[in-house]
Image (cartoon, grey):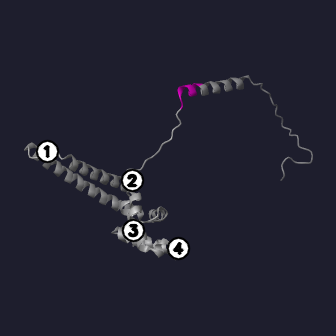
Amino acid sequence: MSSTELATSDDFLLKALKAAQDATSAPKAHGHKRPKRWLLIARHVVEDGMDISAFLKTSGVTRNNYYDIKRFVETHDDYENIRAKAALDAATDYEMGVDLERKYTEKMHDLMDKDEMEIDAKGWAQMQRGQSMKADRFQRFSGAATQHVVVEHVVSQEEYEDKKQELRDKIAKAKEAEVIEISTTDEVNEPAGGHMFND
């Protein structure tokens, strides 16, 4: 099955589990000993990946096992295709939430205009938190949450002037240096014992 033919994350997860089992013959390896748990962890890595600490608490998985399986899954050949699908799913969920939020807001405004309802801050806050979580999930899958760090060496004006003066001093010292003239002749003095270069 080519990477473009992987229709669901289940296909990918089963293929990744098989690859993990083939990669080690140790019977105590996690993929051999507990394949269902391996798949549970891999599914969390591929489809969610959020709040790892809470997942570890509820599933009873150790942090070392989680990150070992995560590294294996993320280096699988088809991982990027599955991540793109998960990003698309997350974007769809987010768009549906935005649509629901708009309808809810419109309904609230209609009811408030008729003096039939006051603003329910609790419901509004819950909806906002839900949308925020969906946006975070989408950004994580799409790579928009990735930070790029640029390191620049910033020089103050004072440091610049000091370096400038240091270079001027070196140039002045070089100009004052004694010049020794070397004459060139057609004759080359050969060292004792023969030719300067071995043939």
Residue 118 numbered mark, or none: 1
Give the SS element for disc 4. loop
The first of marks 2 and 3 along the sequence is 3
Task: Quickly name the residue at label 3.
Answer: 40
Task: Quickly name the residue at label 2.
Answer: 143
| Mark 3 Cα shell of 10 Å, populated few (<14), some (14-19), many (≥20) | some
Give the SS element for disc 3. helix
The first of marks 3 and 4 along the sequence is 4
Give the SS element for disc 1. loop
The first of marks 2 and 1 along the sequence is 1
Residue at image position (52%, 77%) is 27
Residue type indicated by callout 2: Gly
54 or 44: nearer the viewer? 54
The first of marks 4 and 2 along the sequence is 4
The answer for how far apart the CA atoms under marks 3 and 4 are is: 19 Å
Task: Quickly name the residue at label 4.
Answer: 24
Q: Nearer the viewer, mark 2 or mark 1?
A: 1
Q: Are marks 2 and 1 in contact (CB under 8 Å)?
A: no
Percent x, y for residue 185? 84, 35
The answer for how far apart the CA atoms under marks 1 and 4 are is: 62 Å
Q: Are marks 4 and 2 in contact (CB under 8 Å)?
A: no
